[in-house]
Image: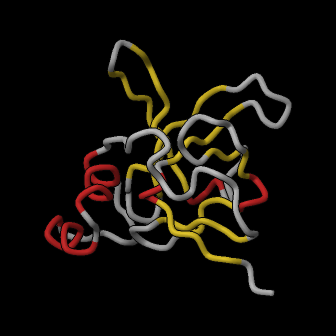
Amino acid sequence: MKFKYDKPDARWRAELDPQAYRVMREGRTEARFSGQHCQPRAEGMYRCRGCHTPLFDTLAQVDADFGWPCFVEALDAHNLFEETEASYGMLRTELFCKGCGSHLGFIYEDDGPDSPVRFCVNSVALEFVARPG
């Protein structure tokens, strides 16, 4: 797949800290509760740390106590893509930024009242932008 923000690996390594690189470019997962965006915060939005593509609004963020930021809907579904991933003896739906191809996290089915799915995203893949006002 061709991405709008296609960068050589050396540039990704220069722009991202080692943890963000492991998560976003190698598809790893940060440790539970280690990220700064686990709890809902001031109103605003989260963008992809790699290319600044808008991904999620804080109004869609839920405190799921999973250990990673969780959202019940995307800001714009066209900014994301997903692929089925098989590891650790299970099938999961992996979530990516359509702007740069960075791994963001996973989508899980949910039986809660908010939404049939939860977008469970690594904090290091996100940057927060407060809503003006």
Residue at the limit of the structure toward the left, as seen here? 10
- Expressed as whole percent of the image width and height from the top left, the position of residue 62 reads 73, 45
Quadrant of the drawing holding the C terminus: bottom right
- Expressed as whole percent of the image width and height from the top left, the position of residue 98 reads 47, 58
| Side of 74 where 69 appears, left or right | left
Q: Which residue is more in the foreground, 39 or 61?
A: 39
Residue at the limit of the structure toward the right, as seen here? 113
Location of residue 85 by image quarter: top left
Location of residue 20 by image quarter: bottom left
| Side of 88 where 34 appears, left or right | right
The residue at the point 44 percent across, 29 percent down is: 84
| Side of 90 where 127 appears, left or right | right
The residue at the point 61 percent across, 57 percent down is: 78
Residue at the limit of the structure toward the bottom, as seen here? 133
Q: Which residue is more in the foreground, 98 or 95?
A: 95
The residue at the point 34 percent across, 54 percent down is: 24
- Expressed as whole percent of the image width and height from the top left, the position of residue 25 reads 28, 53
Position of residue 5 relative to residue 55, above or below, is below
- Expressed as whole percent of the image width and height from the top left, the position of residue 111 reads 76, 22
The residue at the point 33 percent across, 49 percent down is: 23
Position of residue 83 relative to residue 110, above or below, is below
| Side of 27 where 46 appears, left or right | right
By what rule are the colours in the image chosen?
secondary structure
Position of residue 112 relative to residue 70, above or below, is above
Total numbered labels: 0
